[in-house]
Amino acid sequence: MELTDTPTEAAFRAEAREWLRASVPATPLPSGDTREGFARHVEWEKQLFAARWAAVSWPARYGGRDASLWEWLIFEEEYYAAGAPQRVTQNGIFLLAPTLFDFGTPAQQDLLLPRIAAAEDLWCQGWSEPEAGSDLAGITSRAVRDEAAGGWRLTGQKTWTTRGAFCTHLFGLFRTDPAAQRHRGLTYFLVPLDTPGVTVRGFGRLDGDEGFAEVFLNDVFVSDSAVLGGVNEGWRVAMATTGSERGLTLRSPGRFLSAADRLVELARSRRLSPRSRDRVVRSWINAQAYQLFTLRQVSELLAGRQPGARSSLNKLFWSELDIDLHATALDLLGPAAELDGPWSRGFLFALSGPIYAGTNEIQRNIVAERVLGLPRA
Amino acid sequence: MELTDTPTEAAFRAEAREWLRASVPATPLPSGDTREGFARHVEWEKQLFAARWAAVSWPARYGGRDASLWEWLIFEEEYYAAGAPQRVTQNGIFLLAPTLFDFGTPAQQDLLLPRIAAAEDLWCQGWSEPEAGSDLAGITSRAVRDEAAGGWRLTGQKTWTTRGAFCTHLFGLFRTDPAAQRHRGLTYFLVPLDTPGVTVRGFGRLDGDEGFAEVFLNDVFVSDSAVLGGVNEGWRVAMATTGSERGLTLRSPGRFLSAADRLVELARSRRLSPRSRDRVVRSWINAQAYQLFTLRQVSELLAGRQPGARSSLNKLFWSELDIDLHATALDLLGPAAELDGPWSRGFLFALSGPIYAGTNEIQRNIVAERVLGLPRA
Amino acid sequence: MDFALTEDQVALRDTVRELLAAQCPPDVVRAAWPAGEPAALDGLWDALATMGVFGAAVPEEAGGLGLDETDLVPLLEEFGYAAVPLPVAETATVVAPLLAAAGDQRLPAVLSGATRVALAGADRLVPYGARADLVLVLTDTQARLVAPEPEPVLPTVDGSRALTRLSDATGELVTDDPELVSSARHRAELATSAQLVGLGRRMLDLTVEYVGQRRQFGVPIGSFQAVKHHLADALLRIEIAAPAVHAAGWALARRRPSRATDVSMAVVLASEAAQDVARAAIQCHGAIGYTVEYDLHLYAKRTWALAAGCDVDAHLDRLAGALDLKEEPA
Amino acid sequence: MDFALTEDQVALRDTVRELLAAQCPPDVVRAAWPAGEPAALDGLWDALATMGVFGAAVPEEAGGLGLDETDLVPLLEEFGYAAVPLPVAETATVVAPLLAAAGDQRLPAVLSGATRVALAGADRLVPYGARADLVLVLTDTQARLVAPEPEPVLPTVDGSRALTRLSDATGELVTDDPELVSSARHRAELATSAQLVGLGRRMLDLTVEYVGQRRQFGVPIGSFQAVKHHLADALLRIEIAAPAVHAAGWALARRRPSRATDVSMAVVLASEAAQDVARAAIQCHGAIGYTVEYDLHLYAKRTWALAAGCDVDAHLDRLAGALDLKEEPA
């Protein structure tokens, strides 16, 4: 057991830290969930890509560094510690790409992965529909086979699409077998948003940014190469992506360690009531504990034990931790907590954590049924 | 609105306080959930009865004082503040008697109520069975009609019967119509425990007292007068009792106010960590809040609005409050919390609060469905 | 003993409730946000003035309704329930009674609604400061009326509050009678607590309605036990806080010796209850609760804004002092 | 970086687990209670001695297995899981390594199990004091071996601990090397934390098994969402605490500068996690969990007993100090 960097890891960390120190914009970029801020963030993504930091764990031929999971965690830790910008390519890199690696054809991989890493294609996800949120099996958007044209015609409505108004492509599930029940008969499609028949409407989130979109599809034609994984296999393919989203890949501890450090800094700048002091200590403890939990999980993963449903434990913990870190900071700020600022915005954003990617209620069901083995209802 | 005593109420309070001051045993009695302690508590109950304090809100002809609900609350407050003994007649006075008042024949009322108040008959409840806990409709103990003898023959097993090993009578539900589904076909019976065919076995509780019993009934004959309410009406009759148990009558704020006062006294005797100090303050606040909540509820009741399912809110709150008061005290005691004593025993006892009389999970269902109107599953 | 609302209290509350349902629907709250049309608020202000709400706790001989803090609490809950985006609670609970007690000549203009007074909070932040003619500032020992500084409007979580900050709180002395000032401060704390209870009720109502309709997995999501339990707990929090707030109002009206700690209890219970209800409401809504197009956020954000000013620590200290609890030296 | 158990660690843990499953079932824990037959414990003690567990963290040249705190943690979890009613964790983690480091001649008798040493806790309370030949007392600066005072056995929540109290803690000095004493104290804290994790796992296992069988309303109660969520949260608490405890063991083994705060983190997380799991376990069992005939109480009571000695406040203070957080003057 060794909880410090090996020499190789230390060298990797030093390189990342140095590059970030030199490259992270001195003034924070405007929010990537606004149109203007998004464009600035895309520039930053291109800078990351140019220095091969966009997707460190990917193969070099797609723009990565073939980094180990440890090195990936180290990069994330350094990235957030440096106060570097949010990753607006997140959906492509952390949600779509793992699915492409697992289910894509070589042609799809070679075409799409480099463009994702380079922030040339900007992907949003099309899971939720007005009547299908936590219950993805309720999807009604459909894809009808157009044999003559050699492809599919997509019709329906997707919603809660993060940054959908600024992206160039959408991945999502569509019903290809209308006779099949619930999660059967779905297919995973890749759709350029400039295809005729697509309309995107942005709308506002709780934190004030226009970061959600509705995507309307009206008889949108895509070719067979737009199918990821098999026809009618969409549920299985999507679940793999969902696993990535919920699991290790999306919520590395770096983000929370950095927030905890900023919280402690804020707390040091003032005299604390005993209650606030304890809250800060506990928030900080929980961020450390989440890192140790993740390190244990990565070790298990490297020993060949996939986290599987245990990744729902991550989701439960980091989403509550994120709210707690921000609520504690607001507590310290007192009356000033009402003012717009990084902590109040962060708090509002954190409230989405227990909701998206499967509500925490669903996650608790998953833990109980698939990890503890309790009977299904 | 008036949150202080009227002159009449003040006089009632003074009388109760004076009597309790003069009468409450200087040394606490041994636990009423042991055989020896039970006997001592029965003596105390007879003393209460002799001074007409056993059931203050009952009509004078049954040994009460025709006291108002306010006066009843005042008595309870003074009773617990005086450190008076636990009420081992609780099941008779607070659970069975309300049902007798509502469903009993005049003969049953005249026969049984005075004996309950006088602690001559000591009642235990026979709801739960090994396979019917929170789900009372799962009761399988049965009563078979014996037309010739003019009565019923009871067979089955009851369990978790508090103080069952020391009581003289049992009230409970038995299945009279084996063909009826779940909560239909049950009847409410009154059973003297010295009837041939009854066997009682005491067993131990978490808090170390032998206060539970299993009651086995083997072809036990009871006459028709043992039926309370109509044959096959037992569910409706029992639910009224359950309402009393969960509601106002069983958990008056007096008990928690007195525990909160003892907690504050304990806290004053030592230097507190800031965290412990806040915990004490919050526990104390919650006890006061529960009293105000109850006062509001009594006012509503006197205005003709029955609490109904809202009484589940009482159960949820006092049961958590009771645990919290005791856990806070243990926190103050530090290493000494491990030692047997009133706070550690009280803590163990309090843990049963969220379980008995319908688990808190069931209570939350009731609140959601019957108060908020959420759809049933 | 009697802890029921009187018929008069119920009647007045119901009248205010109906007025607010008509004149302060979510659209009017939205109108107070930066991109809105603030003119939509004037009708609401005038209607409340006409009804006499601003003088509710002003003696009849001074032109008010002659009610007390006990009577105010049900109205304050309604102001919270509607998230009224103007200093209505402040005027009725703090400003008008204080001006009346101090014999201030500006009282009639305040009662008629002609002069709109905002109440400065901690850190000299002034909710509705951008829409006020005057600002009342309460220090530990004085009450002063100060000219508002309507710009800049500060960017906030709750955009409907038109929040500004005073750089100069000198103004003009209204009173330095310590009794009047301390009463005004307690009433301000009461107003916040009662509004938070009302906000909690609003968020719960919205959520109960939504989870009864929204279907997932083939059933209304309100039929899931997890949702039921979140909302049962939310109701419990509100139902426990509400009587404590009302009792604090009664203690102020009767000038009970315990009134300061009664108010502190009300603040702690109501602010934490409303914040917990906000969490539960957003969680049970799912993604739609996280959008600004849906109404929930209006009430959740008002909850957070009011709670930010509550200083629970100070109230816990006050309570610990009253209970004579000693703390370890740090 | 590597946070996996080594093959050796897994093998040793599994051996201990099997031994305890056979030699320390609930009946043996019950035998340690006042009404039990304490002779039933001797076989367990001897078996652990024979396996070499007492010398696990003693250098090989001193007759031990030469392992360190990192290796001990998985074993300590097993001691907790089985609620071993003898000072096994204390001997392996604190007593034997300290005697070895101090070059004390009593070490061989301790390793062989011939001399049974208990470890005094706060307030001079001594768990297993009634069944020990000697008591190790750790002050801030010294370690002393003291004669036990086997009577009276104090009535306690957890009757299996044979708790006594020392009136005289003079005894004989083992060491006043501040480094050795401080390490011993940290190891004692580690032992408590790791046992609490194991106790949490045991209570959760018992509960998962029970709710899968117990039927109400026609279905296993484990199929209710409320029960699922209680137990999912319980698992999360344990899974979050466990790596922190193991990392604290590693920090002690490596003598990392952060070791004191790492141990404090472990204590806070493990003690609160185990107590929450106890609550959830009892609640999900319903009435049967509230009886002494069922096994759950054995583990819940041990949890409360260990947690009572944890002094979470002191650990939060230690952490606040390390984070350089200032407190308001009271």
Image (cartoon, coloured by chain):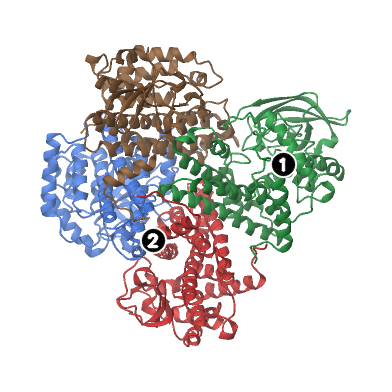
Chain colours: A blue, B green, C red, D brown
Of helix, strand and loop, which one carries label 1?
helix
Q: Nearest the camera: A371 or B38?
A: B38
Query: Image quadrant of residue D70?
Result: top left
Is B270 drawn above or below residue D245 in the view shown?
below
* Chain for numbered disc 1: B
User: Which residue is labeled 2 in the image?
Assistant: C291
Q: Position of residue C3 (x, y in %)?
A: 64, 63
Of helix, strand and loop, which one carries label 2?
loop
Q: If the image is split into quadrants, where does the N terminus of chain C sit? A: bottom right
| Mark 1 Cα-neighbour bin, 10 Å: few <14, some 14–19, many ≥20 | many
| Residue A330 makes an appearance in the image | yes
At a point 56% along the width and 85% down the height, the residue shown is C62
Q: Position of residue D128 (x, y in %)?
A: 44, 23
Q: Which amino acid type corresponds to the residue marked 2 in the rendered image? A: Thr
Figure label count: 2
Is D107 drawn above or below residue A64 in the view shown?
above
| Mark 2 Cα-neighbour bin, 10 Å: few <14, some 14–19, many ≥20 | many
| Residue B235 image label | 1
| Residue B366 makes an appearance in the image | no
At a point 12% along the width and 35% down the height, the residue shown is A8
Q: Is residue C265 left or right of residue A324?
A: right
